[in-house]
Amino acid sequence: MKRVIVDHDGGVDDFAALSLLLCRSDIQIPLITICPGDSFKDTALLATKKILDYLKKDNTIIAGSDFAGVHPFLDEWRKHSNLIDKIDLINQGAVKSSNVIIADQASDILVEKLSETIKYTLLCTGPLTNLSDAIDKNPKIVNQIERVFFMGGAVRTGGNVFLEQHDGSAEWNIYNNPPAAKNVFRSGIAITMVALDATNHVPFTEDFVKRIKRQRKYPASELLYQLCDIALKDSEANDPYFFGIP
Protein backbone atom coordinates (compact mmCIF):
# COMPACT_ATOMS: atom_id res chain seq x y z
CA MET A 1 0.00 0.00 0.00
CA LYS A 2 1.55 3.31 -1.10
CA ARG A 3 1.13 6.15 1.38
CA VAL A 4 0.46 9.47 -0.33
CA ILE A 5 0.13 12.95 1.13
CA VAL A 6 -1.89 15.27 -1.11
CA ASP A 7 -1.22 19.02 -1.07
CA HIS A 8 -3.62 21.02 -3.22
CA ASP A 9 -4.87 24.56 -3.60
CA GLY A 10 -8.62 24.03 -3.90
CA GLY A 11 -9.11 24.54 -7.63
CA VAL A 12 -11.49 22.51 -9.79
CA ASP A 13 -8.59 20.60 -11.33
CA ASP A 14 -7.20 19.79 -7.89
CA PHE A 15 -10.49 18.28 -6.73
CA ALA A 16 -10.78 16.33 -9.98
CA ALA A 17 -7.32 14.85 -9.44
CA LEU A 18 -8.11 14.09 -5.80
CA SER A 19 -11.35 12.33 -6.76
CA LEU A 20 -9.52 10.06 -9.20
CA LEU A 21 -6.75 9.32 -6.73
CA LEU A 22 -9.35 8.30 -4.13
CA CYS A 23 -10.52 5.58 -6.53
CA ARG A 24 -7.19 3.79 -6.20
CA SER A 25 -7.38 0.81 -3.85
CA ASP A 26 -3.58 0.58 -3.65
CA ILE A 27 -3.13 4.07 -2.19
CA GLN A 28 -3.67 5.33 1.35
CA ILE A 29 -4.04 9.07 1.97
CA PRO A 30 -3.49 9.84 5.67
CA LEU A 31 -3.13 13.60 5.18
CA ILE A 32 -4.40 16.28 2.82
CA THR A 33 -3.00 19.79 3.16
CA ILE A 34 -4.35 22.87 1.44
CA CYS A 35 -2.69 26.07 0.31
CA PRO A 36 -5.51 28.56 -0.42
CA GLY A 37 -3.88 29.75 -3.62
CA ASP A 38 -6.71 28.99 -6.06
CA SER A 39 -9.41 28.87 -3.39
CA PHE A 40 -10.65 30.26 -0.11
CA LYS A 41 -9.36 28.25 2.85
CA ASP A 42 -12.60 27.48 4.71
CA THR A 43 -14.59 26.24 1.74
CA ALA A 44 -11.60 24.32 0.35
CA LEU A 45 -11.25 22.49 3.68
CA LEU A 46 -14.97 21.71 3.85
CA ALA A 47 -15.19 20.57 0.22
CA THR A 48 -12.20 18.28 0.72
CA LYS A 49 -13.81 16.56 3.69
CA LYS A 50 -17.17 16.27 1.92
CA ILE A 51 -15.55 14.61 -1.10
CA LEU A 52 -13.72 12.14 1.14
CA ASP A 53 -16.98 11.34 2.91
CA TYR A 54 -18.94 11.07 -0.34
CA LEU A 55 -16.43 8.59 -1.77
CA LYS A 56 -16.50 6.65 1.53
CA LYS A 57 -12.87 7.21 2.40
CA ASP A 58 -11.76 7.32 6.04
CA ASN A 59 -8.85 8.10 8.32
CA THR A 60 -7.64 11.28 6.63
CA ILE A 61 -6.53 14.45 8.42
CA ILE A 62 -7.17 17.72 6.58
CA ALA A 63 -5.27 20.92 7.37
CA GLY A 64 -4.89 24.28 5.67
CA SER A 65 -2.60 27.28 5.41
CA ASP A 66 -3.59 30.93 5.84
CA PHE A 67 -1.13 32.22 3.23
CA ALA A 68 -2.65 32.86 -0.19
CA GLY A 69 0.70 33.44 -1.84
CA VAL A 70 3.20 36.12 -2.77
CA HIS A 71 1.10 36.71 -5.90
CA PRO A 72 -2.44 35.56 -5.02
CA PHE A 73 -4.66 34.02 -7.66
CA LEU A 74 -7.53 36.18 -8.89
CA ASP A 75 -10.61 36.12 -6.66
CA GLU A 76 -12.80 35.16 -9.61
CA TRP A 77 -10.83 31.88 -9.77
CA ARG A 78 -10.65 31.36 -6.03
CA LYS A 79 -14.44 31.48 -5.75
CA HIS A 80 -14.62 28.04 -7.39
CA SER A 81 -14.02 26.46 -3.97
CA ASN A 82 -17.27 28.08 -2.82
CA LEU A 83 -19.15 26.53 -5.75
CA ILE A 84 -17.59 23.10 -5.18
CA ASP A 85 -18.50 23.17 -1.50
CA LYS A 86 -22.15 23.72 -2.49
CA ILE A 87 -22.42 20.78 -4.94
CA ASP A 88 -25.61 18.95 -3.94
CA LEU A 89 -23.98 15.58 -4.51
CA ILE A 90 -21.58 16.02 -1.59
CA ASN A 91 -24.14 17.70 0.67
CA GLN A 92 -26.72 14.94 0.95
CA GLY A 93 -27.06 14.71 4.70
CA ALA A 94 -24.61 14.08 7.51
CA VAL A 95 -22.01 11.38 6.98
CA LYS A 96 -20.23 9.61 9.80
CA SER A 97 -16.54 9.28 9.08
CA SER A 98 -13.15 9.46 10.74
CA ASN A 99 -11.99 12.24 8.43
CA VAL A 100 -11.27 15.40 10.38
CA ILE A 101 -10.38 19.03 9.69
CA ILE A 102 -7.84 20.30 12.20
CA ALA A 103 -6.89 23.86 13.10
CA ASP A 104 -3.12 23.25 12.91
CA GLN A 105 -1.24 25.00 10.15
CA ALA A 106 -0.63 22.68 7.19
CA SER A 107 3.15 23.01 7.45
CA ASP A 108 3.09 21.97 11.13
CA ILE A 109 1.11 18.81 10.47
CA LEU A 110 3.38 18.03 7.50
CA VAL A 111 6.40 18.22 9.78
CA GLU A 112 4.67 15.96 12.28
CA LYS A 113 3.70 13.38 9.68
CA LEU A 114 7.05 13.45 7.90
CA SER A 115 8.91 13.03 11.18
CA GLU A 116 7.64 9.46 11.38
CA THR A 117 9.75 6.49 10.27
CA ILE A 118 7.37 5.85 7.36
CA LYS A 119 8.25 7.30 3.96
CA TYR A 120 5.65 9.11 1.90
CA THR A 121 5.02 10.17 -1.68
CA LEU A 122 3.66 13.70 -2.08
CA LEU A 123 1.25 14.84 -4.77
CA CYS A 124 1.36 18.65 -4.97
CA THR A 125 -1.15 20.15 -7.37
CA GLY A 126 -0.88 23.75 -6.24
CA PRO A 127 1.82 26.19 -5.06
CA LEU A 128 4.59 24.62 -2.97
CA THR A 129 4.03 26.90 0.02
CA ASN A 130 3.15 24.24 2.59
CA LEU A 131 6.00 21.89 1.74
CA SER A 132 8.51 24.74 1.64
CA ASP A 133 7.40 26.01 5.04
CA ALA A 134 7.61 22.49 6.46
CA ILE A 135 11.17 22.08 5.15
CA ASP A 136 12.15 25.39 6.76
CA LYS A 137 10.76 24.19 10.09
CA ASN A 138 12.54 20.83 9.93
CA PRO A 139 14.93 20.19 7.02
CA LYS A 140 15.28 16.53 8.04
CA ILE A 141 11.78 15.70 6.73
CA VAL A 142 13.16 15.54 3.18
CA ASN A 143 14.59 12.14 4.11
CA GLN A 144 11.07 10.77 4.60
CA ILE A 145 9.83 11.86 1.16
CA GLU A 146 10.25 9.24 -1.57
CA ARG A 147 9.22 11.59 -4.36
CA VAL A 148 7.17 14.71 -5.02
CA PHE A 149 4.85 14.77 -8.03
CA PHE A 150 4.31 18.44 -8.74
CA MET A 151 1.91 20.04 -11.20
CA GLY A 152 3.49 23.32 -12.17
CA GLY A 153 5.97 25.19 -14.30
CA ALA A 154 6.40 25.63 -18.03
CA VAL A 155 9.56 24.33 -19.67
CA ARG A 156 9.33 24.43 -23.47
CA THR A 157 6.00 26.17 -23.75
CA GLY A 158 4.40 29.46 -22.76
CA GLY A 159 3.08 30.10 -19.28
CA ASN A 160 -0.44 30.95 -18.14
CA VAL A 161 0.06 34.20 -16.21
CA PHE A 162 -1.38 36.90 -18.43
CA LEU A 163 -1.27 40.07 -16.36
CA GLU A 164 0.05 43.54 -17.04
CA GLN A 165 3.85 43.78 -17.07
CA HIS A 166 4.23 40.01 -17.62
CA ASP A 167 5.62 38.34 -20.71
CA GLY A 168 3.41 35.23 -20.44
CA SER A 169 6.24 32.85 -19.52
CA ALA A 170 5.23 32.27 -15.88
CA GLU A 171 2.99 29.44 -14.63
CA TRP A 172 0.57 30.17 -11.81
CA ASN A 173 1.51 27.48 -9.28
CA ILE A 174 5.11 28.69 -9.26
CA TYR A 175 4.28 32.38 -9.79
CA ASN A 176 2.01 32.26 -6.73
CA ASN A 177 5.04 31.68 -4.49
CA PRO A 178 8.38 31.62 -6.37
CA PRO A 179 10.57 31.45 -3.21
CA ALA A 180 8.67 28.34 -2.07
CA ALA A 181 9.22 26.61 -5.41
CA LYS A 182 12.92 27.52 -5.32
CA ASN A 183 13.23 26.15 -1.79
CA VAL A 184 11.62 22.81 -2.64
CA PHE A 185 13.56 22.35 -5.88
CA ARG A 186 16.84 22.99 -4.06
CA SER A 187 15.97 20.66 -1.16
CA GLY A 188 17.34 17.52 -2.80
CA ILE A 189 13.93 15.81 -2.92
CA ALA A 190 13.27 13.66 -6.00
CA ILE A 191 10.71 15.59 -8.05
CA THR A 192 8.60 14.68 -11.06
CA MET A 193 7.29 17.93 -12.51
CA VAL A 194 4.15 17.78 -14.64
CA ALA A 195 4.50 21.10 -16.44
CA LEU A 196 2.17 22.96 -18.78
CA ASP A 197 4.02 21.20 -21.58
CA ALA A 198 2.01 18.10 -20.62
CA THR A 199 -1.23 19.51 -19.24
CA ASN A 200 -1.81 21.73 -22.27
CA HIS A 201 -2.60 18.55 -24.19
CA VAL A 202 -5.46 17.54 -21.89
CA PRO A 203 -7.92 20.43 -21.48
CA PHE A 204 -11.41 20.15 -20.06
CA THR A 205 -13.51 20.21 -23.24
CA GLU A 206 -17.19 19.66 -23.95
CA ASP A 207 -16.31 16.36 -25.62
CA PHE A 208 -14.38 15.22 -22.55
CA VAL A 209 -17.28 16.16 -20.27
CA LYS A 210 -19.72 14.25 -22.51
CA ARG A 211 -17.55 11.14 -22.17
CA ILE A 212 -17.58 11.48 -18.39
CA LYS A 213 -21.34 12.03 -18.46
CA ARG A 214 -21.83 8.65 -20.13
CA GLN A 215 -20.35 6.84 -17.13
CA ARG A 216 -22.07 8.78 -14.36
CA LYS A 217 -23.31 5.56 -12.73
CA TYR A 218 -20.04 5.55 -10.78
CA PRO A 219 -19.82 7.92 -7.77
CA ALA A 220 -16.43 9.35 -8.75
CA SER A 221 -17.55 9.84 -12.36
CA GLU A 222 -20.66 11.71 -11.26
CA LEU A 223 -18.52 13.98 -9.07
CA LEU A 224 -15.96 14.49 -11.83
CA TYR A 225 -18.77 15.39 -14.24
CA GLN A 226 -20.07 18.07 -11.89
CA LEU A 227 -16.58 19.45 -11.29
CA CYS A 228 -15.97 19.64 -15.04
CA ASP A 229 -19.31 21.36 -15.47
CA ILE A 230 -18.25 24.10 -13.03
CA ALA A 231 -14.99 24.54 -14.92
CA LEU A 232 -16.65 24.78 -18.33
CA LYS A 233 -19.30 27.24 -17.20
CA ASP A 234 -16.60 29.61 -16.01
CA SER A 235 -13.95 28.83 -18.60
CA GLU A 236 -13.57 32.47 -19.57
CA ALA A 237 -12.25 33.27 -16.11
CA ASN A 238 -9.66 30.53 -16.08
CA ASP A 239 -9.10 28.09 -18.93
CA PRO A 240 -9.34 24.71 -17.20
CA TYR A 241 -7.06 21.78 -17.83
CA PHE A 242 -7.18 18.19 -16.71
CA PHE A 243 -4.18 16.24 -15.55
CA GLY A 244 -3.76 12.61 -14.63
CA ILE A 245 -2.40 10.98 -11.51
CA PRO A 246 1.06 9.40 -11.86
Image (spheres, helix red, strand yellow):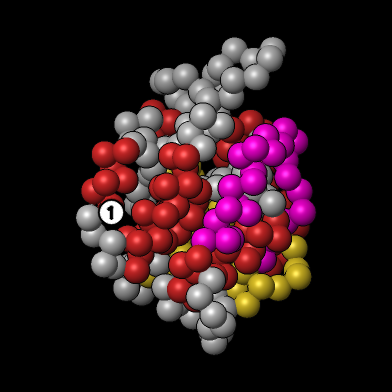
Residue lying furthest bottom in this view?
A: 96
User: Percent position (x, y) of residue 127?
Assistant: 61, 43
Which type of secondary structure does the marked residue at label 1 adopt? helix
Task: Using the image, determine if residue 233 lies above or below residue 146.
Answer: above
Residue 32 part of the magenta segment? no
Work out whether residue 151 can be spotted.
yes
Q: Amino acid at mark 1?
A: Lys
Task: Using the image, determine if residue 179 lies above or below residue 93.
Answer: above
Of residues 111 and 209, the one nearer the viewer is: 209
- Residue at image location 27% in from the left, 46% down from the top: 210
Residue under numbered circle 1: 213
Quarter occupied by the N terminus: bottom left
User: Percent position (x, y) of residue 41?
Assistant: 70, 56
Of residues 203 and 88, the one nearer the viewer is: 88
Lateral position of residue 236 relative to residue 70, left or right? left
User: Percent position (x, y) of residue 223?
Assistant: 40, 61
- Residue at image location 28% in from the left, 67% down from the top: 218
Q: Which residues are magenta?
A: 63-87
Q: Quadrant of residue 113?
A: bottom right
Of residues 140 and 99, the one nearer the viewer is: 99
Lateral position of residue 113 relative to residue 229, left or right? right
Of residues 224 and 166, the one nearer the viewer is: 224
- Residue at image location 65% in from the left, 37% down from the top: 76
- Residue at image location 72% in from the left, 41% down from the top: 69
